[in-house]
Amino acid sequence: PTFQPFQCPVCQSRFTRHENLKRHAALHARSPDSSLSCGLCNATFSRPDLRVRHMKRQHPEEDEQRRRKLSAASSSSSSSRKRARADSPTVSPSETCDDSLVQQANDQAGGVSGLPLEMDAGSLPSPSNLERSISETSTSETAFLPSLADFNFHQWSPDTLFTNQHPSIQDDWYPSDAQVSRGCQLFFDHVAGFLPFLHRPTFNTHQTSKALVLSVLALAYQYGEDPGCSEETASGHSLSVRCFHQSRAFIATEEEHVDESLHGVTLVQAYLLLEVFALMYSTDNDAAYGLKTHSKMICLARAVGLMQPTSPSLPETEDLESLWLTFVRAESAKRTLFAVHQIDTLWYQILSIPRSLSHLEIKHDLPCREAFFAASSSAEWAVKQLSKKTQGSTVPYPDAVRRLLSGDRLNAIPDFDPYGTINITHFILSSAREISGWSSMTGMLSMDRIEPLRTALQALGPYAHPETANGTQSPSAALWEATWETAMIDMQSWSPSHTGGIIANSLDAGLHQMTFMAPSFDLMCKSKIASTIQPHVDWFLRYLDATLVPDTEAPWVILYAYKAFMIAWQLLDGGAKGCMQVVGVQDGDREAALAWAKKAFGRRIHWKLGKVVVSCLDKLRV
């Protein structure tokens, strides 16, 4: 029988997860008179979401009328809420949902990680992270549909929590046309490969929000110099930082005018780019801002309906241009959500910060092929659509996950972009991490849970390493492959910091943990883990050795590669045979191994994470 460590103190019932116990305990705490009635029939319910599901299934006409009335009421009362908000006292950080992200990082420093993030804000529900209860949870999807009308930007604002860093618009400064044009070119050449949700052919800087344009430039000028300073050395970094702070200021003004249309998605995109900058590029102390922005971004994504497919009604026209633009908007929103999900799971894997987003919330299909999304004209898009090899309906992301875990072959799933394999890989790896945390807490190893994940991850391998007809690879290919390779390593060698309950509050701290808490030589060799993960470690060593100009590399690939190198270093230090021969380092030669690592990671020293890795290497004993 499944081990059940959580017991109800009232009726002695036992549960496998703490969330199940909390849900059960609420039944004991509820008054007998607090049951919810239908109002149209004699049915009663113990939870609001069950009543909502009943209304949707048994009384669809009444449910639709109720939704229309609520929508009208929300629209008419939005202005009054804004006036009331201006007169109300400021919400304290301890009352905000986004503050719980950092608070749990402090509270759980000595506890077991892997439990879902709990949010205390009453206006927005938290997702359930019960990954195995797919069919049960998906029936209550209405619980994940908050309204933007109830979203309090002031309550969720990261900047209100840093009074000494509150942004202000710098004399209405805005980059010149030359700086914007050059910045957009740098972004699509160097960044869009790992954050591929903006559509280059239709991205118009004069029609999109200034906050998004500035956040694009903040990342872009990490890869080039400022044309306004005659390409002077380090001028790009200065412009990048200025755009970052100015974007934060513009966002504060744009929040007052956001709606549930495309502008809401644009604001989520701006938040995502600012978060990536704050945690992975900024050399200032912006990590806390980035983590709080993360919570706000996910809650805003729910509020604007980003979790649900847009399902736009096709224009009542035969105009190909309109059809193409409709497709572009829908695919851009979908890719934005997939990027948000990837970053959310990344923080869980690197920092052990509990996830804020459940894969069950994502109702979108898997992303389409990059060639379709990157089409530069409606005619090119139409030709690609008509000439694609496979026709058929697409598959929602949760269904693809379920099919893979149940043993179905991926080739039975309609064609999708390898970018979607990143999300599937992240789900599998996050699930394995939850099992490792549970096993550390209980002392039990549930092979019936870990084996399906391992089998599914192995089956995903060919799709993370796609073969191309002409032998050329997409700039994004390294990210697909690195994500899968690091998942294969983590599936075998559990993170000591994660199983030890250590939660990091920045990537600097996460990298230092990788340095001093890498899996030990004795553990890897005695359990024969080393031989299993060596091919995947070799992949990262070859990648580091061959990538001479990593200017299109996702910054978090550095984290994956450094983790792999530290495993190789432990094996080398312990006397293992052939652990670094793939890059010409002989067995036991620690000095040569360290010199090689400093050279490989030194190619990335232009960026923050590269600098941190090199500083970590300096602390290794030769």
Image (cartoon, rainbow, N blue to C red):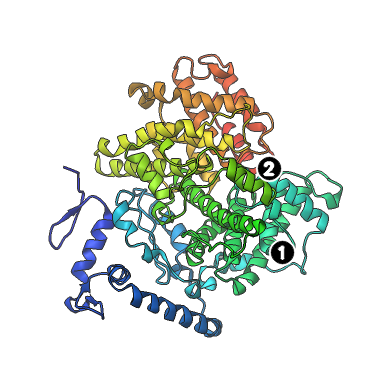
Q: Is residue 60 visible?
A: yes
Q: Position of residue 185 (x, y in %)?
A: 74, 47
Q: Residue at x 14, y 63 (%)?
A: 10
Instruction: Single out the residue that lies furthest toward the right.
Output: 230
Q: Nearer the viewer, residue 507 or 21?
A: 21
Q: Position of residue 216 (x, y in %)?
A: 68, 54
Q: Nearer the viewer, mark 2 or mark 1?
A: 1
Q: Farthest front residue? A: 318
Q: Is residue 226 left or right of residue 308?
A: right
Crowd band around label 2 with a 10 angstrom C-alpha radius: few (<14), some (14–19), many (20+): many
Single out the residue that lies furthest toward the left.
11
Tag 2 residue:
190
- Please state which amino acid type lies under the numbered disc 1: Gln
Q: CA distance from mark 2 to mark 1?
A: 23 Å
Q: Is residue 111 above or below residue 620?
A: below
245 w.r.t. 60: above or below: above
Q: Earlier in the sequence, mark 2 or mark 1?
A: 2
* Mark seen at residue 154: none
